Image (cartoon, grey):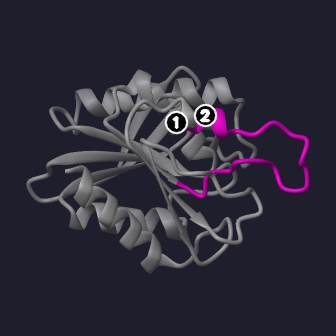
Amino acid sequence: MLELETPHGLARAHLHRADAPRAALVLGHGAGGGVTAPDLVAATAAALAAGVTVALVEQPYRVAGRRSPAPAAQLDTAWTAVVEQLGAGPLEGLPLLVGGRSSGARVACRTAGATGAVGVICLAFPLRPPGRPSAPSRLPELDAVPVPTLVVQGVGDPFGMPPPSKLRTVVAIPGNHSLRAATPVREAVRDWLSRLF
């Protein structure tokens, strides 16, 4: 585990090294959860099996013991600082993929250009707040990603189902926003990585 300074406090990165890695994947957690969420664990296993080193990042607010997330701008700034330090350190020289679950997926999408990512993995992307049909869609965050993107979404996710696009692969799997079914997540990530590299 690495402790990394950011403009908004200390972050942590849990490194899982692949043998002879061909790329690296940096994943962020959801708003109220941590890096042990079932879909993050499944994605990590798939990446390691594909020869991709994984860093699971805890945002500063979580490291500080808070459950309520920081504002989006702070999340993005802290995330970018962590990814830059990882890229200059333990992940140096590796093509970089970024991603996360829910809120972490949004952060990865918003900062994909700034971090120099070659691909983005979104687990349970929160398209629109449940029960608020008039709330703005977050689809523009996905549409703005300039690199190949994988979205793994539960068919019963109350946040909705993003559409596929030229750069975006959407895989619908059993479940809701929690994505507790590990095998479908693992298979979706494995198959996408095999096409990317």
The disc at residue 141 is: 2
* Residue 96, position as x, y percentages in the image: 28, 38
The disc at residue 54 is: none
Residue 159 part of the magenta segment: no
Residue 12, above or below 80: below
Q: Which residue is mark 1?
A: 109
Residue 129 part of the magenta segment: yes
Q: Is residue 17 visible?
A: no
* Residue 113, position as x, y percentages in the image: 42, 24
Seen as rendered, the residue at the extreme front is 166
Magenta stretch: dominant secondary structure: loop
* Residue 55, position as x, y percentages in the image: 35, 48
Residue 177, above or below 94: below
Q: Judge from the rendering whether residue 31 lies leftward or rightward of residue 186; answer left or right.
A: right
* Residue 184, position as x, y percentages in the image: 45, 76
Of 1 and 26, the residue lying toward us: 26
What is the magenta range? Answer: 123-142
C-alpha gap between disc 1 and disc 2: 6 Å
- Amino acid at the residue labelled 2: Glu
Residue 147 picture quarter: top left
**Callout 1 environment at 10 Å: few (<14), some (14 to 19), or many (20+)?**
many
Residue shown at 84%/56% (left/top)? 130
Of 104 and 1, the residue lying toward us: 104
- Amino acid at the residue labelled 1: Cys
Numbered disc 1: secondary structure: helix
Residue 136 picture quarter: top right
Q: Judge from the rendering whether residue 2 lies leftward or rightward of residue 134; answer left or right.
A: left
Q: Judge from the rendering whether residue 143 lies leftward or rightward of residue 114; answer left or right.
A: right
Residue shown at 51%/33% (left/top)? 10
Numbered disc 2: secondary structure: helix
- Label 1–label 2 contact, CB within 8 A: yes
